[in-house]
Image (spheres, grey):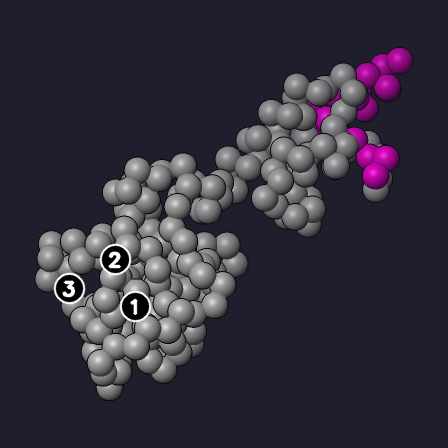
């Protein structure tokens, strides 16, 4: 999987880029790319080769601003302000993608090209509908006992408890699940809950 250091590693090229349009790839040997002024580094040779391939296929020119964006996306970080124009272009090319919150990640095309589709799926995360389907499946399997919130958080370990609760509320609005009890004692069951009420009334 792509690797990015926790701190920038600075090389000593013969000259620094003097403008945002300079090409850092020509300045840093062995695919270690140093950026000015932020000194942001991309260390993954496979990704650099991938970008070079895209450049040849599309005749797109990638400058310092692009590599700054790539470096932040490789670390799944927020993109610095002032790079919106180039960021949109890289999104259109599929080289980066929107991640969780305001963060970005390297695009699916790259992970597919290097045979790491599974890494992409883990980083990208599952979409909302898929997450709700997983929660509903767990709740249905455990109809007899009901499902505690703690268990449901274990189904989606990448999400925090607030996010899981939001998904459960969406399922409840669809009458797909209902809850009995509150807080840690509460349990979730499949259905709208109306069936339980009807049975109680008939009895």
- The first of marks 3 and 1 along the sequence is 1
Residue 21 visible in image: no
How far separated are the C-alphas under marks 3 and 1?
Answer: 18 Å
Q: Please give the residue where the numbered disc 3 appears in the rendered image.
A: 60
**Residue lying farthest top?**
203
The stretch in magenta equals: 184-203
Q: Is residue 44 left or right of residue 162?
A: left
Tag in front: 2 or 3: 2
- Residue 48 appears in which quarter of the rendering? bottom left
Q: Residue 114: where, in percent of width, then height? A: 28, 42
Q: Are marks 1 and 2 in contact (CB under 8 Å)?
A: yes
Q: Is residue 167 left or right of residue 107?
A: right
Is 145 covered by the magenta stretch?
Answer: no
Say whether residue 187 is magenta.
yes
Query: What x and y, as percent, mark residue 175?
Result: 65, 32
Write down the quadrant of residue 142 in the picture: top right
The tally of labels here is 3
Residue at 89% x, 13% y is: 203
Label 1 belongs to which residue? 33
Residue 32, above or below 119: below
Q: Residue at x 50, y 54 (%)?
A: 100
Residue hosting label 2: 48
Q: Position of residue 13 (x, y in %)?
A: 25, 77
Where disc 3 sits, the SS reads loop
On the question of residue 185 being in view, the answer is yes
Nearer-N-terminus badge (2/3): 2
């Amino acid at each position: 999987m792509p690797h990015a250091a926790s701190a920038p590693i600075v090389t000593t090229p013969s000259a620094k880029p003097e403008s945002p349009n300079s090409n850092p790839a020509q300045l840093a040997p062995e695919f270690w790319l140093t950026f000015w002024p932020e000194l942001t580094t991309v260390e993954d040779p496979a990704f650099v080769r991938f970008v070079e391939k895209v450049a040849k296929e599309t005749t797109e020119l990638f400058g310092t601003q692009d590599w700054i964006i790539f470096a932040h996306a490789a670390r799944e970080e927020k993109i610095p302000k002032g790079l919106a124009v180039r960021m949109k272009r890289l999104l259109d090319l599929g080289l980066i993608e929107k991640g969780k919150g305001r963060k970005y990640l390297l695009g699916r095309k790259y992970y597919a090209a290097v045979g790491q589709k599974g890494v992409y799926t883990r980083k990208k995360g599952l979409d909302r509908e898929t997450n709700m389907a997983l929660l509903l499946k767990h709740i249905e399997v455990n109809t007899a006992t009901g499902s505690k919130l703690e268990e449901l958080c274990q189904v989606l370990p990448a999400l925090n408890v607030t996010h899981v609760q939001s998904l459960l509320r969406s399922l409840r609005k669809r009458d797909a699940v209902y809850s009995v009890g509150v807080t840690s004692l509460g349990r979730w069951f499949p259905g709208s809950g109306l069936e339980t009420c009807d049975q109680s009334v008939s009895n």
